[in-house]
Amino acid sequence: MIKVAYLQCPTGISGDMCLGALVSLGVPVEYLSETLNKLGIAQEYKLRVELVQRNGQQATKVNVDLVHNHYHHHEHSHHHGRHLPEIEKIILKAQLPSRAEAWSLSVFRQLAVAEGAVHGIAPEKVHFHEVGAVDAIVDIVGTCLGLDSLGISSNHEGLPMLYCSALPTGGGTVRAAHGEMAVPVPAVLKLWEMRSCPVFSNGIDKELVTPTGAAIVTTLSTEFGSPPPMTIKQVGLGAGTINLPIPNILRLWLGDCTNNSEDPNGNLETITVLETQIDDLNPQALGYVFEALFAVGAVDVFTQPIGMKKSRPGILLTVICHPENMLPCQGVLFRETTTLGIRRSTQQRAILQREIQSVQIEYGKVRVKVAWEGQKQDNSITNVQPEYEDCAELARKYNIPWREVQRLALHTWYLQNQ
């Protein structure tokens, strides 16, 4: 079963909102604290979890409370805020679960690349201010630990099967080390640009997406936009700090990918169906339309007779194709028929695995299409069909009935495969 997650961000996203949503989904705080302790910065912060209300809705708030040891604090900030190489060392030394380690390193690198681009310096030279550094380390490593421990599947690039909604831009200004800054802050804007993020304005003029939140989703999300087809099993709610006109809650949906739920062998595929009805085309043109559609990759084409307005007899022309061939097929319909509009829909189809085998009968060779469900070795062959054209060719050549050739081919195949 493929486990996927979807981040719904109506009020944006920050690192602590991610932590809140993960704890809400059942990632134990003790597990996060103990594992984060391996980073060797435990004396600098405390994790505190509380249930809070946001516009009358309850959600989980995770606070990273920084420990202010003034002497320590002072000395630390003068000698070193933390740079990327130092943070990478801290993460590598902690011996985290392998996926959490790899994801944390990627997120920090992405954040440093963006900050570096903003200031015009190399990623290695980016200085994570002391407070920001501890916060960011806990948020980022904690989020990666949580996603890993929920058992979210990895995709072929080793990233989690995490999807994310479009992000709200926010607005107004925010106070920062260098004075007031416009929202979205430069690092967030750079991260969105690096990943081509879809954004929208929800009309709220506050900082809604923080650099840490943006780094997490632009690094780890497989895709931005609508939720993937999934069966929802659980929803986690992570609260943001401030109250907003709509509940300041990040919602993390956890579930199974429905593309594969019916069918463990993944034999469901997505296809596009184009249809249009026509009542003013010379029927001779249709043969040509069929050929042209198959030439650009249509999987199947068929017509049905229909009655249309003004009592005209017409046809409903339907084309089934893979999504990547949709535009060429649509082009053929517009070019070769009189239609002014084409409806399209996306559907799922269950398909059998198939291969072409061939058999030798007394008249010659006939190819046979063999189809099965699941694993072939399970003897689950469900469909055996000799190729029409091969049978027709031999039937013409030897002047025997087509059905006879077809029967012989089938009989021979079954004899060989018993």
Image (cartoon, rainbow, N blue to C red):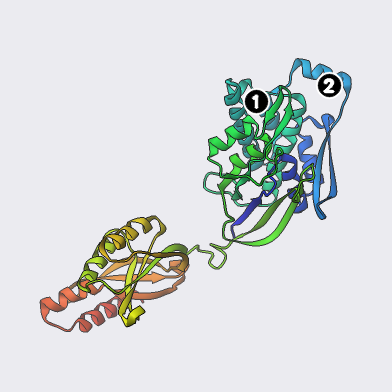
Which amino acid, by three-letter code, is at mark 1? Leu
Callout 1 environment at 10 Å: few (<14), some (14 to 19), or many (20+)? many
Q: Please say whether residue 308 is visible from this viewpoint.
A: no
Residue 73's disc number? 2
Front-lying residue, 62 or 203: 203
Question: Who is closer to the viewer here, 363 or 86?
Answer: 86
Task: Give residue 197's position: percent from left, percent from top.
Answer: 56, 42
What is the C-alpha distance between the residues marked 2 and 1? Answer: 20 Å
Residue 84's tag is 1
Q: Is mark 1 on a helix, strand or loop?
A: helix
For this view, does 96 lie left or right of residue 365? right
Does the image show residue 10?
A: yes
Across and down, in percent, residue 231 comes to: 62, 63
Q: Which amino acid does label 2 sit on?
A: His
Mark 2 falls on what kind of element? helix
Q: Identify the residue at image location x=53%, y=40%.
A: 196
Asked if the residues shown at circle 2 and circle 1 are in contact, with their CB atoms under 8 angstroms apart, the answer is no
40 above or below 369?
Answer: above
